[in-house]
Amino acid sequence: MATFEYTAEKDSKVLTGSLEAIDREGASKVLAKENMRIISLNEVQKSKFNLNFELSEPRVKLQDRVVFTRQLATMINAGVPLVRSLATLSQQTDSKALKRYLAEVVHDVESGEALASSLKKHPKAFDDIYVNMVAAGEEGGILDSILLKLANQQEKDAEIRGKLKSAMTYPGVILSITFVAFIFLMTTVIPKIGTIIKDLGGDDYELPVYTQVMLKISDFMVNDGPLLLVLSIIVFFILGKYIRTPKGKLNFHRVLLKIPLVGKIITKVAIARFSRTFSALSAAGVNILESLNVTANAVGNEVIKRHILDAQQAVKNGKSLSEPLSGVKLFPPILSQMIAIGEETGEIDTVLEKLADFYDQEVDQVANSLTSILEPIMIVILGSIIGVIALSVFGPISSITQSI
């Protein structure tokens, strides 16, 4: 993308400004669509000393994508041509990342490329689900209704994420405060108090075992803390690299599913996402094999993804979708039962949409349970740590005072 500065005339007024476009021709077309007569149009030359720290393409925020999708659906439904709709939304959006991608999409669509194939070039903004549903909408001539379904689906996904984040916020804050307070006490307060206790008690005074343990932990953190920090960073770095590998990611997701309550939440979220995505793709006319492939990549867990891909292979071999899913212990029986009903009635999209709503409510309940369980646990942990430290400090002081 290049930046162009322009001077143009519109309604007998001279206007100046800047815009982003792929080339000079693209910039000229954007100005022409705004009924501007170009007086001058110059590309802004970037300094050769300017360093580009952008390591990858910027991501588009979910809310920005939802707003764009709804607005595009409205404009197409109103009969506005696709290219004009895209160009208008490109100028109106406040998202710099989305503005950049849409400028390229406008150029591609103007050149005769399909909207779906143009969007596919920008995976940071438009994922496989988005692209496949747009492609189905273009083929079926129902792009506006498909875009509305997409917007609804993205909003539901964002709602689930928001609820889980809010459920984890309070426990996360308490845990962070506990960690910071523990480090501060053990590296700053305890060493000084330990010295005072030893001076008061004298050489013959033997400290209680729990106080000795606390002082040894404190000494270790003060003397070997930097080394421990470096080793921790190295371990986390190695684990991070491993988790990003296919095998590491699979093992990590397998462990997450085995954690009590956490595994239940992940499974319910994945089933809700699977049901809603598969329903939307099915309603859009995407064939079942392609729908399963796209949905597998959307559930967010490698273990569940593999089960869905196994089901896809079984469907290829002539089985109904409900059969392979019924044999997966990870999935609740209601999933395969509802899919079987949908296959029998020919309304699998409607059935799965209702199932997704049901699991959205389940996620709400589990998230609330998580909050109610973790809050007291975090408070007990924080209180226990402070209590142990206080006992280790005031126990010896009380004993020495009584001896005196």
Image (cartoon, rainbow, N blue to C red):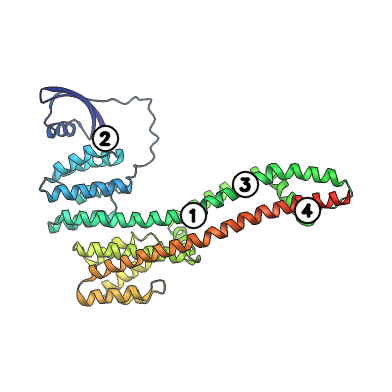
Of pointers 1 and 4, the one earlier in the residue sequence: 1
Quadrant into which the N terminus falls? top left
Residue indicated by mark 2: 1
Of pointers 2 and 4, the one earlier in the residue sequence: 2
Q: Residue at x 33, y 68 (%)?
A: 358
Q: From the image, state whether disc 3 or disc 2 is nearer to you.
A: 3
Of pointers 1 and 3, the one earlier in the residue sequence: 3
Query: Looking at the picture, which amino acid does disc 2 mark?
Result: Met
Q: From the image, state whether disc 4 or disc 3 is nearer to you.
A: 4
Query: Looking at the picture, which amino acid does disc 1 mark?
Result: Tyr
- Estimate how packed mark 3 is, as few (under 14), some (14 to 19) or many (20 or more) residues with alpha carbons within 10 Å: some
Residue indicated by mark 3: 181
Of pointers 3 and 2, the one earlier in the residue sequence: 2
Per the model, the C-alpha gap separating discs 1 and 4 is 46 Å
The reply to whether residue 180 is visible in this rendering is yes
**Could you say whether the residue bearing mark 2 is in a helix, strand or loop?**
loop
**Could you say whether the residue bearing mark 1 is in a helix, strand or loop?**
helix
**Could you say whether the residue bearing mark 3 is in a helix, strand or loop?**
helix
Q: Residue at x 59, y 50 (%)?
A: 178
Of pointers 4 and 3, the one earlier in the residue sequence: 3
Disc number at residue 395?
4
Query: Looking at the picture, which amino acid does disc 4 mark?
Result: Gly
Query: Looking at the picture, which amino acid does disc 3 mark?
Result: Ala
**Could you say whether the residue bearing mark 4 is in a helix, strand or loop?**
helix
Left or right, 28 with reference to 253: left
Residue indicated by mark 1: 242
